[in-house]
Amino acid sequence: MTYHIPSDKQIQTALRKVFRQFRTVQSQHRLKKLVTNELNAKKKTFGVSERRLRNIALESDFVKLEIHSREGDPKKILSKCPVCGNVLGRVKNLTIWGGEVTIEFRCSNCNYWTGKKKRIPTRYAFYLKKK
Protein backbone atom coordinates (compact mmCIF):
# COMPACT_ATOMS: atom_id res chain seq x y z
CA MET A 1 0.00 0.00 0.00
CA THR A 2 1.40 3.37 -0.96
CA TYR A 3 0.67 6.63 0.74
CA HIS A 4 1.45 10.27 0.11
CA ILE A 5 3.07 12.72 2.50
CA PRO A 6 0.91 15.85 2.85
CA SER A 7 2.39 19.33 2.93
CA ASP A 8 2.31 21.40 6.12
CA LYS A 9 -0.36 23.60 4.54
CA GLN A 10 -2.58 20.59 3.79
CA ILE A 11 -2.21 19.41 7.39
CA GLN A 12 -3.07 22.88 8.75
CA THR A 13 -6.16 23.01 6.55
CA ALA A 14 -7.24 19.60 7.81
CA LEU A 15 -6.55 20.71 11.41
CA ARG A 16 -8.79 23.75 10.92
CA LYS A 17 -11.61 21.54 9.62
CA VAL A 18 -11.22 19.12 12.55
CA PHE A 19 -11.28 21.95 15.10
CA ARG A 20 -14.36 23.48 13.49
CA GLN A 21 -16.12 20.22 14.27
CA PHE A 22 -14.42 19.34 17.58
CA ARG A 23 -13.29 22.15 19.90
CA THR A 24 -11.30 19.68 22.05
CA VAL A 25 -9.38 16.52 21.14
CA GLN A 26 -8.21 14.61 24.22
CA SER A 27 -5.34 12.61 22.73
CA GLN A 28 -2.68 12.86 20.06
CA HIS A 29 -3.70 9.49 18.62
CA ARG A 30 -7.32 10.64 18.22
CA LEU A 31 -6.18 13.89 16.57
CA LYS A 32 -4.07 11.91 14.12
CA LYS A 33 -7.07 9.73 13.21
CA LEU A 34 -9.33 12.76 12.68
CA VAL A 35 -6.76 14.65 10.58
CA THR A 36 -5.89 11.55 8.53
CA ASN A 37 -9.58 10.93 7.84
CA GLU A 38 -9.96 14.55 6.75
CA LEU A 39 -6.93 14.31 4.45
CA ASN A 40 -8.06 10.98 2.99
CA ALA A 41 -11.47 12.41 2.09
CA LYS A 42 -9.82 13.64 -1.13
CA LYS A 43 -9.51 10.07 -2.51
CA LYS A 44 -5.77 9.84 -1.78
CA THR A 45 -4.07 7.92 0.97
CA PHE A 46 -2.09 10.28 3.19
CA GLY A 47 0.18 9.42 6.08
CA VAL A 48 1.38 11.76 8.82
CA SER A 49 3.27 10.94 12.01
CA GLU A 50 1.92 11.95 15.40
CA ARG A 51 5.09 13.91 16.18
CA ARG A 52 4.90 15.93 12.93
CA LEU A 53 1.20 16.59 13.49
CA ARG A 54 1.88 17.75 17.08
CA ASN A 55 4.63 20.13 15.91
CA ILE A 56 2.44 21.60 13.15
CA ALA A 57 -0.39 22.07 15.66
CA LEU A 58 2.05 23.84 18.01
CA GLU A 59 3.14 26.20 15.24
CA SER A 60 -0.43 27.06 14.29
CA ASP A 61 -2.09 30.10 15.79
CA PHE A 62 -5.39 28.38 16.62
CA VAL A 63 -4.42 25.26 18.65
CA LYS A 64 -3.51 25.20 22.34
CA LEU A 65 -1.61 22.19 23.69
CA GLU A 66 -1.97 20.78 27.20
CA ILE A 67 0.71 18.32 28.32
CA HIS A 68 -0.09 15.58 30.84
CA SER A 69 2.96 13.89 32.34
CA ARG A 70 4.34 11.42 34.85
CA GLU A 71 7.47 11.46 36.99
CA GLY A 72 10.63 10.05 35.46
CA ASP A 73 14.22 9.32 36.39
CA PRO A 74 15.63 12.41 38.16
CA LYS A 75 19.19 11.46 37.10
CA LYS A 76 18.41 11.81 33.40
CA ILE A 77 19.54 15.16 32.01
CA LEU A 78 17.37 16.72 29.34
CA SER A 79 18.88 19.04 26.75
CA LYS A 80 16.02 19.07 24.23
CA CYS A 81 12.31 19.40 24.82
CA PRO A 82 10.60 15.98 24.59
CA VAL A 83 7.47 17.64 23.17
CA CYS A 84 8.77 19.83 20.33
CA GLY A 85 12.54 19.26 20.17
CA ASN A 86 13.62 22.83 21.00
CA VAL A 87 16.51 23.54 23.37
CA LEU A 88 15.36 23.79 26.98
CA GLY A 89 16.17 27.00 28.82
CA ARG A 90 17.46 26.87 32.37
CA VAL A 91 15.67 28.74 35.16
CA LYS A 92 18.29 29.57 37.78
CA ASN A 93 18.19 30.77 41.37
CA LEU A 94 20.87 32.28 43.59
CA THR A 95 22.05 30.36 46.65
CA ILE A 96 22.70 32.06 49.98
CA TRP A 97 26.44 31.73 49.26
CA GLY A 98 26.19 33.61 45.97
CA GLY A 99 26.25 30.61 43.63
CA GLU A 100 23.70 29.70 40.98
CA VAL A 101 21.51 26.61 40.96
CA THR A 102 19.27 25.41 38.12
CA ILE A 103 15.82 24.85 39.59
CA GLU A 104 13.93 23.91 36.43
CA PHE A 105 14.07 23.67 32.65
CA ARG A 106 11.53 25.40 30.39
CA CYS A 107 10.73 25.29 26.70
CA SER A 108 9.91 28.67 25.18
CA ASN A 109 8.03 27.12 22.26
CA CYS A 110 5.50 24.76 23.86
CA ASN A 111 5.50 25.66 27.59
CA TYR A 112 6.87 22.26 28.69
CA TRP A 113 8.74 22.48 31.98
CA THR A 114 10.45 20.08 34.36
CA GLY A 115 12.20 20.34 37.69
CA LYS A 116 14.27 17.96 39.80
CA LYS A 117 11.66 15.26 39.27
CA LYS A 118 11.74 14.88 35.51
CA ARG A 119 8.34 15.16 33.84
CA ILE A 120 7.80 12.69 31.01
CA PRO A 121 4.93 13.57 28.64
CA THR A 122 2.32 10.81 28.52
CA ARG A 123 -0.72 12.41 26.92
CA TYR A 124 -1.45 15.55 24.94
CA ALA A 125 -4.79 17.35 24.82
CA PHE A 126 -5.48 19.82 22.01
CA TYR A 127 -7.88 22.75 22.34
CA LEU A 128 -9.13 25.42 19.99
CA LYS A 129 -7.67 28.76 21.15
CA LYS A 130 -10.14 31.43 22.12
CA LYS A 131 -9.88 34.63 20.12
Image (cartoon, rainbow, N blue to C red):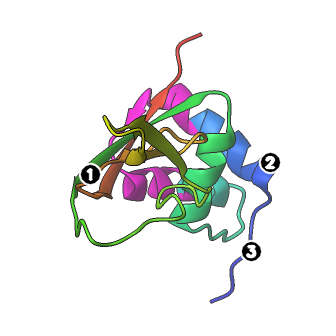
Q: Is 111 left or right of 73, judged from the image as shown?
A: right
Query: Three-letter amino acid code at disc 2?
Result: Lys
The residue labelled by disc 1 is: 69
Coordinates of residue 61 in the picture (x, y in percent): 67, 29
The residue labelled by disc 2 is: 9
Q: Is 49 left or right of 60, judged from the image as shown?
A: left
Return the mark for residue 126: none
The residue labelled by disc 3 is: 4
Magenta span has 24?
A: yes
Q: The residue tagged with tag 3: helix, strand or loop?
A: loop
**Vertical order, 98 against 21 (above or below):** below
Instruction: State which region is magenta.
Output: 18-36
Coordinates of residue 82 in the picture (x, y in percent): 47, 61
Distance from Cα at disc 3 to Cα at disc 1: 32 Å
Q: Is 126 or 14 nearer to us in this picture?
A: 126
Which residue is found at the position 27% from the left and 71% from the top? Answer: 75
**Which of disc 1 and disc 3 is earlier in sequence?**
3
Q: Is 127 left or right of 62, judged from the image as shown?
A: left
